[in-house]
Structures are given as structure tokens and as C-alpha cells.
Amino acid sequence: MQLKTIRTIYFLGIGGIGMSALARYFASEGYRVMGYDRTHSSITEALEKEGIAIQYDDRTVWVESLDSTQTLVVRTPAVPEDEAIYCYFRTHGFSIYKRAEVLGWLTKQKKALCIAGTHGKTTTSTMLAHILHGSQLGINAFLGGIANNYGTNLLMDKRSEYVVVEADEFDRSFHQLSPYISIITSMDPDHLDIYNTEEAYCESFAHYASLVRQVLVVKSGLKEKLELWGDRLKAKVYTYAVSEGEKADFYATHVRVEDGKLWFDFHTPGGVIYDMELGVPALVNVENSVAAMAVAWLIGVSENLMREGLRSFLGVYRRFNIHLNTPHIAYVDDYAHHPKELEATIASIRNLYPNRYMIGVFQPHLYSRTRDFATEFANALSMMDELVLLPIYPAREKPIEGVTSENIRLKVESIKPMIAKVVEKSELVAYLRKRCNEINSPCVVATMGAGDIDRCVNEITKNIL
């Protein structure tokens, strides 16, 4: 990728979390940054406040004055190829790169610490970035979520030789990266609209693992899975786990929650670091923190700095955010959108609020994912006492005949007798307030999903009591 003659960088789908981090990076490097997105959001509003021009309709009049020899176009697969602006760029000689290609180029400029996996990527990468930010090593980071400690998804330290990058498997994007060290958190099948089979999905991870140059840190059990695709691994492999019952190089023991705080002992090949406090007291984050600290330990971060980094970590926006915690009602919001993520989130909420009646709100993300995992979704969601389903959030997809949220509701009711309803998003806040007032015992409400359910969070927080 040549940037010598480039003056303007235009992002198609600039409101995406990964795209916005790149936009912020190039703006900080002095480029004129512009973009298009179909919807207003908190991210696009923040970018505009930072001086980045954004258009919300695809009329080409916005871009006809751009010089194709001085403009680089970055696109995301989420933007349809028949969008008028995209067609204009294609037919007028502009250089167009996928977001993954640009990110891959950036990973070649520094020692890239890449975090891959079906789930856990964003929290693990943000946690690692936070630990390194407070260390002598410093960090640059392109994050897949807004870090609560910093209010942004981009960290910049030009003095640092390291960059943290989230390695996304969608559309095989992570094959464009050049990882120096990598974590693989999980390989549970997903994106079957792209991969078709679980075998193809795992083979894609095996190819990614073969790209890692120095060290690969994988969750216990995944090394054997990767090796099914041949002896491709060049990197030295370490394993991690939450329990010493699983043989691993890095693991946690003595996990306990006391007075709303979570503690554990961190085991490394060099010894044990006792009584580590996790800033976000959710069981699901213990595994992520072990992975993040494994990499920090391997590149030389001291025990004291790891301890302080973990204690002061405030989490990621929409990753187990606790918005209310009163004696009668607690409210947790989470990005979980895969069955395994739902299981982990629900178990963590149960652990934190063991005696409360739990009402879960889930917005399925993608028709294809709902079709492929309806039974698995139902099994996970039946772990709650009551379920509210929103209609499917389509994202990049068109409806699939016969696939609706009602499919999940019916499967849940066949597993467990419980209150389970499909509610329109516009009716959600009033419905939750009514149900919480009807329940005479302490309850916890959880909203989960990767669509636009986050736009209900403030209203729920203000009106649920």
C-alpha cells in the first residue's frame, strides 16, 4: 500500500467500530479523513466532533470533487457493492482497499499483538492494551470496542514498538495480518454464511495460526484442534486456562468474589502471582485476563504493573456493563450474540447476583446466524427465568423466509416452561418497567445482542425503576 501521494482517505462504512479506529489513526497522522455511513450513531457523532466529515446518504455529489490519484478508499464488506458511492469509486479509477488489508499493512510496521477467536477478542485486546499502556513498553492499539478507561477505540504511542490488533475472522479478514504474537481465545463455529461448515471455519483459524511469527497463546484444547490441519505452526505455542484441572502454561486458581470484587491467583511458567484483583468482576473476564496477562508476562511486563493494570481496568462499552445496582433491580448490558457468549454472560450474571429473578432481553443478530444456531440459542437463553426477544437485527443481510425470533421463543418454551415473549423494540422499556414492578423479589435485567439494542440502554436505565 503506497501512501506517498495520498492526501485524502475516504471510509465506506466509517461508523463501524473497526473502521472508526482506522479513521482516527489516519486523522492523527495528518490525512484529510472523510466517510460514509447509512446511520447516525454515537461513534459517527464522536468522529464528527473530532473534525471528520461524514455523509449519511450515498449521493455521489459528495465525492465527485475528490482526486482519484490523491485519494485512498477503505471499505468494509458490510457496505453493499451496489451502493452508489462505491460504484462511483470503482468506475473512476480510485484505489480501493478492504479494511483488513489496511490493518494488515499497519501490523507490518510494528510488532503486532493480535487477538483472534470467536468470542473474547475485544475484552482481551482492550485489557492487554490497558496493561501495556501503563507499562514501560507503551502501546498502540486498534480496538474492537470503546475502552471505558479512555473513551476511544484507538490508543497511540509512537514511541512503542508494539501494536494491539483485534484479528477478525469474518470474511477471512485475519489472513491479511502479520502477527508477531497472537492469542486465540476460541474456535466455536460462527459466520457459517461465509464458511458453510465448521471444518472450513477451523481450517481458517489454522491458516491464521500459521502466520504468527513468534509466539501463539491458545486456550487449552485448541492446540490439538489446530494441528488437525497439518504441522503448519512456526511459532512457539503456550496454552492458557481458567482452572489448574486443565493442563496449561498459564492458568487461574482460587477464583472468588468477595464484597463485589473478584480475585484470583495467576500461574505462569515462572511462578504464581497471588491475589490479582480484576477491575470488572465478571467470571467471564477471568479467562480473558489470563490470556492478556500471559502475553504481557511473555514480553516482560512486571508483576506490579500487571497487577495495577488488571485492578484499574474498567472494561469495554457493552461488555458486561453494569448500569444499575439497587437492592431491588440490577441492570447489565452485554454485546453477547453467539450462543457460547450468551452462556458465559448469563453464568457470570448468575454468579454476581445469585438469588435474583433474571429477565433476559436478547436481540438476535443476522438471519443466517439465527437459522444456524436457533437450538443453541434456545439452550443458552433457557438458563434465565424469563425471556424477552426482539426481532432479528439484519445488519448486512436480507430476510430469510421462515427465520424469525419466534423460532427461538418456541424452542425455549419446549425446553423449559417460562415466560418468553417477542416484543418490538419500541415497546421494550415500558414492558420491562411493568414486569419489574410486578415481580415482588429482587431481580436482574440483562440486555444482550450485537445489533442496535444498545440504543435502548439509556432509556432502560432511566425508566426501569
Image: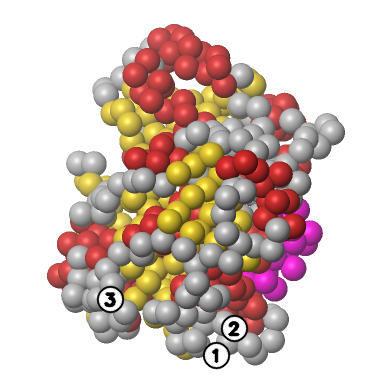
> What amino acid is labelled 1 in the image?
Lys
Residue topped by disc 2 = 210
Q: What range is drawn magenta here? A: 191-205
For mark 1, does the 10 Å Cα neighbourhood hold few (<14), some (14 to 19), or many (20 or more) residues? some
Residue topped by disc 3 = 160
* Left or right of 388 in this view: 182: left
Can residue 222 be seen here? The reply is no
Is 86 magenta? The answer is no
Q: Percent from the top left, x then y, of residue 403?
A: 78, 34
> What amino acid is labelled 3 in the image?
Ser
Asked whether disc 2 touches disc 1, contact meaning CB atoms under 8 Å apart, the reply is yes
Q: Percent from the top left, x then y, of residue 324?
A: 31, 28
For mark 2, does the 10 Å Cα neighbourhood hold few (<14), some (14 to 19), or many (20 or more) residues? some
> What amino acid is labelled 2 in the image?
Ser
Q: Nearer the viewer, mark 2 or mark 3?
A: 3
Q: Nearer the viewer, residue 78 or 50?
A: 50
Q: CA distance from mark 2 to mark 3?
A: 25 Å
Q: Nearer the viewer, mark 3 or mark 1?
A: 3
Residue at image position (55%, 62%) is: 71
Residue topped by disc 1 = 234
